[in-house]
Image (cartoon, helix red, strand yellow):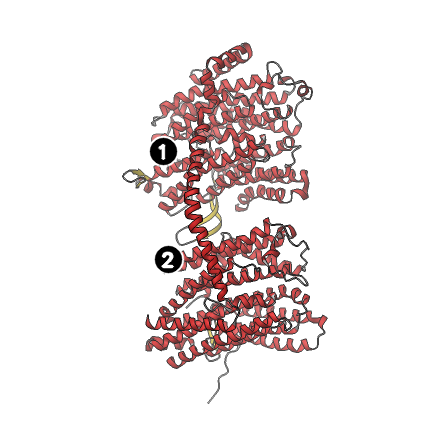
Amino acid sequence: MPYVYLAIPLAPLLGAIIAGLFGRQIGRAGAHWVTIIGVAVSFALSLWVFKHIVLDGAPVYNEAVYTWMATDAFRFEVGFLVDNLTALMMVVVTGVSLMVHIYTIGYMHDDPGYQRFFSYISLFTFSMLMLVMANNFMQLFFGWEAVGLVSYLLIGFWFKRESAIFANLKAFLVNRVGDFGFLLGIAAVLMYTGSLDYMAVFGQADQLAATTIEVLPGTEWNLVTVIAILLFIGAMGKSAQVPLHVWLPDSMEGPTPISALIHAATMVTAGIFMVARMSPLYELSEVALSLVVVLGALTAFFMGLLGIVQNDIKRVVAFSTLSQLGYMTVALGVSAYSAAIFHLMTHAFFKALLFLAAGSVIVALHHEQDMRKMGGLYKYMPVTFVTFLVGTLALIGFPGFAGFFSKDAIIESVHASSIPGAGLAYWLVLLGVFVTAFYSFRMFFLVFFGEERMDDHARAHLHESPRVVTVPLVLLAIPSAIIGWIAIEPLVFGDFFAGAITVAPEHDVVGEVGHHYHGQWSFILHAFQAPALWLALGGVATAWFIYMVRPSIATAARERLGFLHALLDRGYGFDEFNNQVFARGTLALGRGLSSQGDARVIDGWLVNGAARLVGWGARVVRHVQTGMMYHYAFVMIAGLLVFMTWFMFA
Amino acid sequence: MTMEMPNLVPVLPEIVVLAMTCLILVVDLFLRDDQRDVTYLLTQATLVVAFALTWALGDDQVRLTLFGSVVNDPLSDVLKLFIYLLTFMTFVFARPYMKERGLHTGEYYVLGLLGVLGMMVMVSSYSMLLMYLGLELLSLSLYALVSLNRDSTRCSEAAMKYLVLGAVASGMLLYGMSLIYGLTGSLNVIEISHAIVRDGADLPMVVAVAFVVVGLAFKLGAVPFHMWLPDVYEGAPTAITAYLSAAPKLAGFALFVRLLAEGLGPVTAEWQQMLMVLAVLSLFLGNVVAIAQTSFKRMLAYSTISHIGFVLLGLLAGTNDGYSAALFYVVAYALMSLGGFATILYLARRGTEAESLDDLRGLNDRNPFAAFTVLILMFSMAGIPFTLGFWAKLAVLRALVQVDFVWLAVFAVVMSVIGAFYYLRVLKMVYFDKPVETAPLARGLDFRLVFGANGLAILGLGLYPAGLVALCAGAINV
C-alpha cells in the first residue's frame, strides 16, 4: 500500500520534471502527454484509494514513508494520513486537475510557453497532494509553501506583462503575511507538544487547552486559542478571507486554466481543508471559532457585492469564489466541518466548470474578457452555454443542483448554531444568497443574451470551442448537477467523516439539522419554506429585470448611487489602504532603515567594516604566508612555545 | 622459551597491500610506457581486494595482535574501507590528468599504494612506534609524490617545503612520544592510559602532550601549523593534491583518536584546551583567507583548513558522540574535497591546468552535468540542508552543545556563514557568468561515472544520512 500512496503524488511530479527539464526534447505533444498520463495515473489510483478506504472500509493509513531527520527531541518525516477526508480531497484534486490538463491543450494551443505551463500545473498537483496527504505539520507546511510558489509562477506565467508581474508579487506578499502566522502556529505546536505528528498533537489537545500563555505581558491566552488563530491566519492567506483576500482577484492575470485549478478548485481550499483537519484543536477554542465565523461571513457577503460591479468576466467569477470561500469558512466556524468540505467539493466542480466555460468564451472572442463586448453567445456556443448555465445554477443554489445542497446545509447549520457571531453570520449568508444569484445571472445574461456587442471581425470568427475544451466542460457539468444529490446524505448527515473530523457535542449543529433531514426530496421541499431559496430566485428575477427588460435601470443606478458604485468598484479601498499604509509605510521604513541603519551602521560599520577588517586580515595573513620556509618553521616553533608556556602556567 | 606465533589474520589486508605493491613494482619494470594501464589496473585491483578482505574480516569485535601493537576494531575497519574507496576514486580521477602531463608512471601508483599502506598502519596501530612508522611511511610517500614532476620548479619547491616542515613536525611528534614513553614506561596506548591513571599527570606530561598535539596538528593542517598546506596544495600536480587532501586526513583523524582519546584520555582536559585554540584559529583563518583567493586550488586548501577546524571541534568534545561526529565530518570532508579537486581535474586539459576560479565561469553552459555536481559539492561544503555537509556540521554542533561548549558552536556557525560566501560565489560563477573558455570537457566514461557518483553520494547521504550516522556511531567505542 505505501507504494500506491507514494505513487499518487510522485506521478505528477515525475511528469512535471520531464516536461519542465526536457520540454524542448520531447516537444509540445510529448509534454502534454507525459503530464496528462501522470495526473491520470494519480487520478485512477486516487479513485482506487477512495474505494479501498471509503467504500470497502479499510482502516485509516497513517505511516511515515521517509524519515529525514530524527533527533533526540524531534522527528521530521514525510508520511501519509489517508482517511475518508484525505481520500475525498485526493479524488477532487486529481479529478479537477485532470480536466484542467486536458482543457489546457486547447486553451494554451498557441502559447510559446506550452511545456512550461504543463510542467507547472503538474507540479502544482504534486504540491496539493502532498498537502492533503500529509500526516504531520512539516509536510503540511511544505505542501502549503509549494502550492504558494507554483501559484506565484503561474500567476506570472505571462511574465512579460507588467500587470501579471504585479499580481504575482502581490499574491506572494499577501500569502507571506498569512504564512507567517501559519509558521508561528506550527512553531507553537512544536514548542508545546514536542511533536509535529497530527495524531500525537491531537492526543495532547486537552493539555494544550488547559495551558495559558502570556502573548503580551499581562494578558493570559489559552494556548489552543493562540495556535488555532495563528493557523487560521495562514488559512486566511491561502483561502483568501478578509482582509487577506486582496490577492485573489488580481490573480486572474494568469491563464484561465490556472484560475480554474488554483484559484477556484484546489489551492484556495487548502485553508478550508486545513481547518477541517485541525478540527480537534479548533473544537477546543470557542474564541477562534467565533473569529472564523465572523470573518467568513464578512467575506461571504461583502465580496459577493463586489461581483456586481465587475465587467471582466473572470473577475466576476473570482469574486464569487471569494464569496463562496466565505461560506465554507462560516461553516467551519459553526463546527459544520462536513458541510464545509461538502461545499468545497461541489464548489470545486462547479467553479472549475464556470472558469473553464468562461475561458471557452474568452478564447472564442480572441482573448476578450470584457462582458460589455459580449452578448447573445448562446446561438454560437451551445455546449458552452448549457454547461455555463449548469454551473451558474449550481452556484446560486438552484434546487436539485450541487450547490443547492451544500449551501443550504451551511445556512441551516448557521441557523442552528449558538456560537457568538452566528447570529450576524446568518443574516449575512442569507443576504449573500440574493447577491450571488444577482451577480451570477447578471453575468449570464450579459454574456449569452441581449444584443451582440462584439465587433464584426470577432463575430465572424465565432464558433464553438474544440473537443479538448468542451469535453472537460461536460465532464465537469455532470458532477456540478448531480453530486449534491448523491453525496449529501453520506457526507453531511452520515458518518463519512467519523474519525477524521472531531465535533464537540455542544457544537454539533449538523447533527441537529440532521434530525429534520428525511431524504433529498424533503430537503428540497423544505427549502421552499425557507427564505434562502426565495432570495435566490429573487436575485435571478432582479437580474433579469434590470439587464434584460430595462437596461436603463443599471445606468441610472450607477449614476444615482455613484458613491456606492465607486466604493464597490474600488473593492472597499483595501488595495488603496494597503498601498498607502503598508506598501508606502514599509517603503518609508525601509528607506529610513536603509539610509540610517543599512547604509551607515550595517554597510558602513559592519559589512564594509568587516570586509575592510577581513581584507586587512587577509592582507596581513598573506604577508605571513611569505612562501619562505624558515618563516613557516618559525611560526610552528613559536606556536609550540606559546602552547607550552600557556598550558604550563595555566 | 617458546615464541608464540602472532595471529596474522587481522593484518591480512596490510600484508596483501604490501605484497601487491612489491609485485607491481617489479611488473612495472617490464612494461613499456604505453602499457602503463596494466599498472593502473593492478593497483585498482589491489584496492578492490583489500576492500573485500577488510569487509569480509570486519565485525564489531576488538582484536589485538602482534603483541598488542596492532588493533583491529570497527573504527579501523570503517576508516580503511573509506581509505580504499577514496584512493580508488582518486586514481580514476588522476589517470587522464597524469597521462596528459607525461606523469603517468609506475612510481605514482607504487607510491600511492605505499601511502595507503602507511595509512592502514596508522589506523590500526596501538603502539606509538607503529604509529610513527605508519605516519612516516605515508609522509615519505607524499613527499615523493609531490615532487613527482621533477622538471617543475613549483613542484620541487612545494615538495621541499613539505619535506623540511614535515620533518620538523615529525621531530616534535617523536619528541613528545619519547617523553610519554619516559613518563609512563610504555609504548602501548592502553598501558599509557593505565599508567597515567595510576601515577597521575604532572608538568612534563603537559609538555609531552603539547609536542604530540603540535605534531599531529601539522599533519592535519590546523592553524598555526598549516602554513605548508596552501603552498603544497597549490604547488603539487592537481592529481597529487586530490590524493593528499582526501584519504590521509582519515588516517590523521585515526591518530588523534588512538593517541589522544584512547592513550591520553585521562588528560583530556589538557589537550581539549589545545584543540580548542587550534579549532578556533583554523575556522577563522580558513574561512576568512579563502575569500581572498583567486585560485580555486588555493581556495579549496583554505577550505580544508576550515573543515579541519570542524573536525577538531568534534574531537575536543571528548565524548563518544563527539568522536563519531568528527569521524562523520572527516568522511564527509574527504568526499567533498576529492570532488572539488576532481572538478579541477575534469576541467584540465593538455596544457591547461584550470586552477583558477575564472576557469569555472559559465560551466553550466559548457557542461550542465559537471555544473550540477559542483553545485552539490559547494552546497555540501557550505552546509546547506539536504546535503551531506549539513549533517556533518549538525552532528559536530550537537556534540559541542551537549558538553556545554555553546559559544564554540555559535562561533563555528558564524564562521560557516562567512564560508558560505565563497562557496556560493563559485556557484554564481558556474551558473550566472559567461564562459571564458568554450572548449568541451573531454573525460572518459569512468571519470564521469565516478565523478557523478561522488556528487550523488553527497546528495544521497544527505537525504538518507541514517546509515552513515549509524556506521560512525558504531565505529567509536572509546
| Among the 4 quarters of the image, the one containing residue A9 | top right
Q: Is residue B127 visible?
A: no
Mark 2 falls on what kind of element? helix
Residue B239: image location, x then y, percent: 61, 66
Residue B342 point in image, percent of width and height: 60, 61
Give amino acid for label 2. Val
Q: Position of residue A71 (x, y in %)?
A: 42, 54
Q: Report how far apart the C-alphas of labels 1 and 2 lie in the structure.
A: 39 Å
**Label 1 element class:** helix
| Residue B435 x %, y % | 64, 52
- Which residue reaches farthest bottom? B1
Using residue A29 as the reference point, say whether residue B279 is left or right of it. Answer: left
Chain bearing mark 2 = B
Tell me the quadrant of the picture where the C terminus of chain B can be found.
bottom left
Q: Which mark is residue A432?
A: none
**Circle 1: residue type:** Ala
Q: Tell me the chain of label 1.
A: A
Looking at the picture, do discs 1 and 2 lie on one chain?
no
The residue carrying mark 2 is: B406
Task: Say which of A477 and B275 sits in front.
Answer: B275
B457 up-or-down from A479: above or below: below
Q: Nearer the viewer, residue A297 or A584?
A: A584
Tell me if residue B136 can be seen: yes
Q: Residues within 10 Å of mark 1 (few under 14, many from 20)?
A: many
Q: Is residue A640 above or below residue A378?
A: below
When the figure is inspected, residue B393 is found, relative to residue A545, above or below; the finding is below
Towards the viewer: A38 or B153: B153
Residue at (58, 76) in percent of width and height? B18
Residue B117 lies left or right of residue B184; in this view the side is: right
Circle 1 sits on which residue?
A288
Q: Nearer the viewer, mark 1 or mark 2?
A: 2
Quadrant of residue A213 in the image?
top left
